[in-house]
Image (cartoon, rainbow, N blue to C red):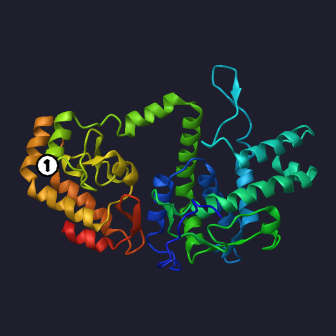
Amino acid sequence: MRDDAPVIAREDENRAASGGFAERLLEVIDSGRRTATYKLAVLMALLDLCARHSQADGQAPRLLHTRDIAEQVAALYWPQVIPYRLPGSGGAIELRQITLARATILVAVSRFRAAVMAGGATSLYLACQRLPGEYATMLDQVEVTVAAQPLPRLQAVGSTETVFPFIYELSWGPRESFSPARLRRHGPRGPAVRLLPGAGDELIRLGPLIRPLVELHWTRMVAEFNGVAKAELDLHRHLFGSDRLIPPKTLRDGLAALQGNRCFYCHESLGTGSEADHFIPRVRSGIDAVENLVLADRRCNNDKRDLLPGPAYVTAWVRRNQRHTAELTHLATASRWDSNPQATVAVARSIYGHLPNGGTPLWLGFKNVGRANPAAALAALV
């Protein structure tokens, strides 16, 4: 058993896919914690398989199996294990796609590719035909890894790794360990992955929008892991990132004073490690007005990341802005910073007003992510 296995949020886990599906999917892509590209590969595989295994009426399948997913994941990595030629240098490197030393999937695919290339095969189609035994061995390694790691964790949210199922349910427990032999006990295609009602069709419908976004995140991860295409990454941060929008010291000091030099979230003393946090995550709105900034300690800020705060925090945030309207405006003027209380509230109202009840995990505090009623947050914003 793994001590770090994710916790599954049991409440409402059999609910049908709803209007919150796209919201949750974007949350997984934009805010999910990743140390490898494996989760993105599994998500891409699900997009492909829902279309490839569609029923006669065009609807998505109800079940997929771990062998199906392993085959598609291996196909995705097949061209990626070729050494990457560095522009202008003439050299080539094997691209890292995981922060850990062990990269089971990549090693398995790379070894299989090396074996078949020695025989002159370059396509995966020919490779499967020429070395079926080696292909099956490679898939065993990919399947075991996929079943143990990215599949149970893809739907996890926040640092607690709590799983909120909205795409699929697994037919095995989160702490179950696997071997090829144990996988085959579930049948030749491995354990079942049951798609929640409507989820597969949502993946098909959203595929043209989601695929480019997944590819973009995947590319950025690999570029950062390997230190390549640095100029392009720097350009993106320059154009759209928040690195250059660091509030000046006068603004941070003023916010700290309004908060009694305590973290807005946990109320502990700020000390020297305070950070300005966009209360409504910048990835959702891009609003930098002083009314959307709070001071937080590094622990809370790193844990919250791009998650939406729960109703209790929204209420506290609204009260702070209402009680200190004049101070915030003066602080912004003195710091040459934007102040726009109306737009800030409008952005928050629009976001919480479009969340499905109980459908989107919200940040409720350090190491605490859960489903909360967004109507309570919206009520504080009216």
From this viewpoint, is residue 13 visible?
Answer: yes
Where in the figure is residue 201, as x and y percent of width and height? 58, 71
Where in the figure is residue 69, as x and y percent of width and height? 71, 61
Q: In which quarter of the image is residue 139?
A: bottom right
Q: Quadrant of residue 120?
A: top right
**Residue at point 55%, 42% (across, down):** 221
Query: Is 87 on the left-hand or right-hand side of 181?
Result: left
From the viewer's perspective, is residue 198 above or below residue 330?
below
Amino acid type indicated by mark 1 = Leu
Query: Is 231 on the left-hand or right-hand side of 271?
Result: right
Residue closest to the eye, 92 or 350: 92
Quarter of the figure with the C terminus: bottom left
**Residue at point 20%, 40% (across, down):** 252
**Residue at point 13%, 49% (across, down):** 258
From the viewer's perspective, is residue 21 above or below residue 225?
below
Residue closest to the eye, 56 or 216: 216
Residue closest to the eye, 374 or 267: 267
Where in the figure is residue 10, as x and y percent of width and height? 50, 76
From this viewpoint, is residue 337 visible?
Answer: no
Question: Total marks drawn?
Answer: 1
Residue closest to the eye, 217 or 165: 165
Quarter of the figure with the N terminus: bottom right
Where in the figure is residue 109, as x and y percent of width and height? 77, 46
Q: Mark 1 points at which residue?
A: 258
From the viewer's perspective, is residue 287 above or below residue 373?
above
How crowded pointer 1 is (Cα within 10 Å; few <14, some 14-19, many 20+) is rated as some
**Residue at point 75%, 46% (across, down):** 78
